[in-house]
Image (cartoon, rainbow, N blue to C red):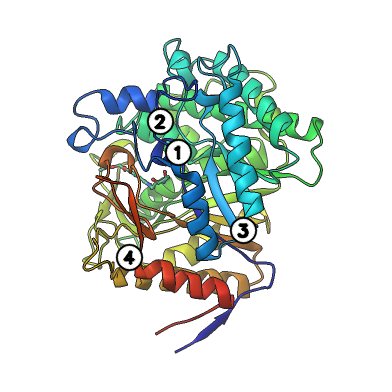
Amino acid sequence: MTIFQFPNDFRWGTATASYQIEGAYQEGGRGLSIWDTFAHTPGNVYDGHNGNIATDSYHRYEEDIALMKELGIDTYRFSIAWPRIIPDGDGEINQEGIDFYHRFVDTLLAAGIEPFCTLYHWDLPQALQDVGGWENRRTIDAFVKYAEIMFREFASKIKFWLTFNEPWCIAFLSNLEGKHAPGNTDLQVALNVGHHLLVAHGHAVKLFRDMSPADGQIGIAPNVAWAVPYSKSAEDRAACNRNIEVYADWFLDPVYKGSYPESLYNWFKEAGATPPVQDGDMEIIAQPIDLIGINYYHPTVNRYHPEAGYLHSEPIDMGLFKTDIGWPIDSTGLYDVIHYLQKYGNIDIYITENGACINDSPQNGIVDDSMRISYLQQHIAQVHRVINDGIHLKGYMAWSLMDNFEWAEGYRMRFGLIHVDFRNQVRTPKESFYWYQNVIRNNWMETR
Ligand SMILES: CCOCCOc1ccc(-c2cn(C[C@@H]3NC[C@@H](O)[C@H]3O)nn2)cc1
């Protein structure tokens, strides 16, 4: 048994996202998002699930925040639904939407919980997609207008901001692999989307500085892959590097270095695609940021294979224990990838997502999700190990507060510390909720 003591100022939290929990998709003046369209299109989401109701948190946020207070978190990561603020993307402001988030944030603050706000967690207004979405540079200006409204309204209440969640998912999963909204399957489209979201990020950061909100911090939240080569061969090592770089470096090099990673740039160029860089873009992207959020779930073991996707990098099943979504459980990847990111300097890092898909259900009112406790314990131990190495890892937000809409997997894949019965919205804290509550209360963890 080991005791892991955390710094007094370490932040403990949970995370969610607007489309995954709010529901009320046609209420409060909300416009449609690309995820409404994608989920309403047969075949895109498991069993036709969608976010029309989700966990009904638009109506139940006070109950949710009471559970957060019981859990004892000091930080809550959530996202704003752009379609609630500007229903058609860049037209009229919807005051009802702004008012909703003021009530929500005020309730969080009254509960002593720090709001940690993601501006864009994938729910692009459909009206913007109708004219090209992130492929169209016009969406950059629309995003900056949206961000300005949010900073003006909330910078006095919200001190932690993320521009984009998981840029790899926005660009590649959604526009090359076609698995998320809007479901394109073209490499050049993916590079266009990825570049434009980076330019939008840079403009939003510059605007944030120009509006000089008192003591606010802003960053971006890439999901990171950690790939270990199956063999020591140069081919396998290169295949792993491509896999790691496409999630992290493709976005963080432009932000921290003002240029795309050369090797991957050339890899895509060989495939006939290059980012649509215009004069001044790379300078605006490289606006200094204050922090990054890192979303980590699992590592992979990869080898080179000429027919393995756009990176010729094939993940190998090494027989590890897996969560119910099929991801291997190996917390060492978290330690390794955080050290990998030190090449950008000893930047302030928050783990803005980490968690396990374990589909346990209540038995006599108890959800004995011991596998999730084991997963969290292993990963929080690695968080401590990273801090012990002097790395500025400032906080940990478990994904997720409660079971919710897990994108293409719908509601069958459960990541929550709280079980949600989607037939009646009954929330049941799982055993992992009480385990995490104890870690937070003590600010230390013991392994068992
Ligand atoms: C067979 C090939 O498939 C290609 C990879 O396909 C995926 C799908 C999904 C993910 C994925 C999902 N999550 C959790 C979410 N993070 C943001 C938050 O909203 C959570 O719901 N992280 N990564 C990665 C890769």
Foreground mark, 4 or 3, reads 4
Foreground mark, 1 or 2, reads 1
Residue under the point 36% across and 35% down: 173
For the residues labelled 3 and 2, the Cα–Cα distance comes to 41 Å
Can residue 164 be seen in this snapshot? yes
For the residues labelled 1 and 2, the Cα–Cα distance comes to 8 Å
Question: Quick one: label 1 or label 4, which is nearer the N terminus?
Answer: 1
Residue under the point 40% across and 47% down: 243
Q: Which residue is mark 2?
A: 24
Pointer 1 local density, CA inside 10 Å: few below 14, some 14–19, many at least 20: some
Tag shown at residue 342: 3
User: Looking at the picture, which amino acid does disc 3 mark?
Assistant: Gln
Question: Quick one: label 4 or label 3, which is nearer the N terminus?
Answer: 4
Question: Quick one: label 3 or label 2, which is nearer the N terminus?
Answer: 2
Count of all numbered marks drawn on residues in the image: 4
Question: Quick one: label 1 or label 2, which is nearer the N terminus?
Answer: 2
SS for dot 3? helix
SS for dot 2? loop
Is the distance from the Cβ of mark 3 to the nearest ligand 1 atom less than 8 Å? Answer: no
User: Looking at the picture, which amino acid does disc 1 mark?
Assistant: His
Mark 1 and mark 2 residues within 8 Å of each other at the beta carbon: yes
Query: In terms of image quadrants, where is residue 323?
Result: bottom left
Mark 3 and mark 2 residues within 8 Å of each other at the beta carbon: no
For the residues labelled 1 and 4, the Cα–Cα distance comes to 35 Å
Foreground mark, 1 or 3, reads 1
Q: Position of residue 227 (x, y in %)?
A: 38, 56
Tag shown at residue 59: 1
Foreground mark, 1 or 4, reads 1
Can residue 184 be seen in this snapshot? no
User: Looking at the picture, which amino acid does disc 4 mark?
Assistant: Ile
Q: Which residue is mark 4?
A: 329
> Is the residue 148 above or below the residue 57 in the image?
above
